[in-house]
Structure formats: structure tokens, C-alpha cells
Image (tube, helix red, strand yellow):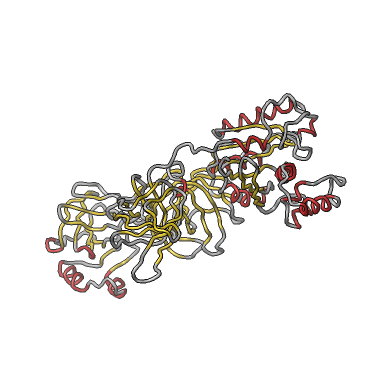
Amino acid sequence: MKGLLKFITCGSVDDGKSTLIGHILYDAKLLYADQEKALALDSKVGSRGGKIDYSLLLDGLMAEREQGITIDVAYRYFTTEKRSFIVADTPGHEEYTRNMAVGASFADLAVILVDASQGVLVQTRRHARICSLMGIRYFVFAVNKMDLVGYDLSRFREIEEQIGALGKELSLANVKIIPLSATEGDNVTAKSKNMEWYKGEPLLEYLENVDIVGEESEQGFYMPVQRVCRPDRTFRGSQGQIESGSICVGDEITVLPSGEKAHIKTIFVTDRQVPEAHTGQPVTITLDREVDVSRGCVFTKDTDIPVCGKLNVSLLWMDDEPLVTGKEYLVKLGTKTIPGILTEIRHAVDVNTGEKIAVHTLSKNGLAVCEIRLAEGITADTFKNHKTLGEFILIDRVTNMTSACGIVLEAERQTQQTNKAAFAAGEITARGDIFEEFFYDISGFNVMKFQPVHETYTIGDAIPLKGESYSYPENFDILVLRDKASVTVRNGKIAQITSFDEYAYTGVPVVNGRGFEILVSSQEDVKHLLEEYAPEDPEFFRRRMKFDTYRKVVFPNSDK
């Protein structure tokens, strides 16, 4: 028997998705006797003149039956002699596109229905794009309702050309096109006598035999940590599902985002201790030394997964409220959830043509490529490299609703040393936060800091004097109080990096490591400043520093 196949049915409203799956269940004798009897009784009050209405097997909500449309995602589990299946029957109406996207996120294959009398519609294109966005690589285009066009071969060929053009536009691989009639059963579970010109197999036979093979296996081992298990003070295990690769007792792993290394001490699958574990297994792993591990960390081996501060993503907007830049969301990626600001809409995508469109906002069910800046480093990768670490959702912090889902196209790596811009010369290093950007979150009514620069500067290097929320003079001094180091900037370049013992005030403006003006006017003032420095005392900062001399809080992508 072949392995489990998870597939989704989608398409426009009234294309016959529920009817198709219901007919498969009915013809394949996969119903209990009482279900069959109930179906026959329910069908008598329907719209088919007493004939069996197969869609009733899946449209379970009263609103669905009354309207004759699918609203919720209906999951069905069934098994034939050759294979086991899980199918998600999804709504076709544009209003419920978010429901359809949820169904697509779990599937290996998409069955997209096309009404033979209407051909490829906008919603057909939208669903094909979303399925591709969600990582589905196998597509069956079921050209349904062939009975309504007299089983006409020429009409099928026309639609076949439309599907071919769509597949080329979206770079769809592994495309199968099957003409059928879900209500009459043509080419559903058995070959149709009405379409002898079709030489391929019926839908169920194709689904039973198709081999779902990943285009490329993911590189190395990685496991996002779901939970840290502490039943008592003698045991500390990290729990999660292995997403790729295998691990053995004694193997050295890297814990991200910290970059710390440790060796595997024990591996448990449920309550059994095992010497090794593989892709897909939920495990509990203990390490041979104390390492800072919490939910959202990732164990890796033999793969280079970056820690990122900025993501370029392709997303589907699912919120009733339009997307606007500058709003803070919770970004859930892997097992990690952190704040992030959607700072830029690079372009929207026209669902019908695939054209890139310059926009400043995005409405519900829109597709776009955007930039997200994160409040801290997160372990992420492109969707094509590591699927689980390349798919995400955005959660509205006020309503707690899912606002968007999507995949990572580019993951901008942070420097592993400090994850922040820094200054260094010889043995002297200083953390330089003066390049942090201050953005105002309109929805949350608060200020968020984001760090778009991650370089280390040394003597002779030019530094960025202007950003979205900062502007420094060409000549100034930086006193990094927490690291007891000074940086002298002349003509926009670093002239000197010294300890406080060697620093001499020369009358130029002075800022701290975060870019706030330090209120000093003499070497004596500097001496008192250093003596009074109290990092936990707000009064020290109120008395000695001024925020808005070289800094301001901005609305992302505004002119303010």
C-alpha cells in the first residue's frame, strides 16, 4: 500500500468540489449503511429532484446546505485498498479564501476544479497561486461538469490550453488534467463511456498511484524546540518534532539563535529511550551540558540556518482591515513568536495576470511581497531551503486574529557575534546601537526599535550618518558607557577607538551608544558623567541626556 496522501479540493463557487469527494466516498463503498440511508433521505429535499446529492456528505453546516456552498473546511479520512487519504474540502467563495489557505497549508496535492462551461476563472487563478504559495507541488485540474457541455472534446481542449498557460505563468510542476462529471460519476472512480477520447486514468486511480516526492530533501538535521520538559530537578529535556534529517546519541548539535554547541546525551521517543531518531518523529532530547534552551530555539546539525533580523516575504492578506505599513504584529515562525513591523510593501500581485503592482496598502485576499523587520533575531530560512522555518503567520496584537500567512523569500542574516552594529579596534570593542531605527506603531500606540545595520566598524571606516530616524553630524564623539569605550568620528569616518582613560573632550557633539545627546561641555563634565553613571537609574538619563537632538520617531515609509 502506498503512503498517506493529504490533498485539498478547491476552485470557484459551485464548481462541484464537495460533490466530487462525496461521489468518491459513495462509489468506493466507503460509507456506513446508516450514512447511505441518511444521504438518500436528505437528497429528497434538495435541488436534484430526489437524485443523490453527494455534496451533503461534506457540507455539514446548516448554512452550507441552505446556500448550497461550502463555508468551513471539511476534513475527511478514507482508505481504499491501495492508499489512505486525508482530504480537505475547502470553500470556493472569495469571502472564505482564508479558510481555503488553511486547508492548503497541510496538503501535498491540490485538486482544483474547473467548470467546463466557464473555464479558468479569477478564483481558479487565486487558488492555484495560494496553493503554490503554500508549497504544494502537485496539481490535478479536474475539468468538471463535462455533462453540461455534451462531453465535448473541443471544449476540453480549450480549457486544457487555459490551464497550460496558467501552469506556465505560475511555474507549476507535476500537473495532471482530467475531464469528469462529479454528479454523474464520469472519470471519478471509473473510466467514462461518455468520454472515450480521454485515454488517461480516472481521478481516484490517479490519486491512488501518484508518487509525492519532494523536489529536494532539506539539508541536514533541524528541530524547532516546542517545549522544555522539567518533571523534576534531575531532568531537563527539549521536546519537538524532527523536521529534517536524523540525530544519534553523541552527535554534536548547534542551538540557535545563541550558536552554542553541545552533544546529545539521550533521545526519548514517548517514554522509550532510543539511540537515534529521524524526520517526522516527536522526540525529547537531553544535552551533555547546560545550554540556554527555550521554546522557539532550533537544534541543528550539518546545515547552515541563519539568525535573521529582517525577512522578505510573499504573503496572503487575510484580515478584514487593510494592510498598512508601520503596524506591529506578532510573527509566528516555527515555534517562535516575536513582535515585528511590516515596514514595506514591495509590490502587490495581480491574481489574474501575475503583474506586479505598486501599492501602499493591501485589502483582504490580496497577495503581495513585503518586508518585515523583527524586534530580535529569529531562526529562519527561505521556504525552498527549510520549509518549517520558511512559513509564517502574522497575528494582530489587539484582536489576536490571524492577519496574514506566507513564506520567506529572503532571510537577511545577522552577525553571529553580537547581532548588533559594533565598533572594534585591537582589544577594544563597543556595542554601537546608534544605528537602531525608532518606528511608531500606529495600532499599538507604542515605539518599536529595529536594527537594520549589523556591521562591525573599525578605524578608517565610514559610518552611516543618516537613517530613517537618525541624523548625525560629520564630526562627533561616541561614549559607549556600558563598555567604557569612546569612538571619535571625523568627516564621517572613525578616527579613533579608545578606552575612557585615553578619551579627551574637544568640544564636538557627544552622544551615547544609542545616539542620545550627552549634555557635557568640558572634560570636567565628562569626568562627572562617568562617575555618576548608573545604568538602572532613569534620573541619570533624564539629567544627563537628550533624545531628540539627533534622533526622532518615524512612521515607516513616511516622509516624516
Q: Quadrant of residue 112?
A: top right
Q: Quadrant of residue 238?
A: bottom left
How many numbered discs, if any? 0
* Quadrant of the frame with the C terminus: bottom left
Left or right, 196 with reference to 406: right
Question: Which residue: 82% across, 50% down?
Answer: 40
Q: Is residue 40 visible?
A: yes
Residue 495: horizontal and vertical position, in percent?
17, 51
Q: Nearer the viewer, residue 399 or 350?
A: 399
Left or right, 301 with reference to 118: left
Q: Nearer the viewer, residue 57 or 15?
A: 57
Would you place residue 545 above or below residue 461 in this image?
A: below
Q: Residue furthest left?
A: 502
Residue 388: horizontal and vertical position, in percent?
46, 49
Question: Which residue: 48% across, 49% down?
Answer: 391
Residue 462: horizontal and vertical position, in percent?
25, 47
* Quadrant of the frame with the N terminus: top right
Q: Residue furthest right?
A: 49
Q: Quadrant of residue 239?
A: bottom left
Would you place residue 215 above or below residue 85 in this image?
A: above
Left or right, 451 with reference to 484: right
Question: Which residue: 44% across, 40% down?
Answer: 217
Would you place residue 197 above or below residue 88 in this image?
A: above
Left or right, 195 with reference to 301: right
Residue 493: horizontal and vertical position, in percent?
22, 49
Q: Is residue 375 visible?
A: no
Q: Nearer the viewer, residue 101 or 185?
A: 185
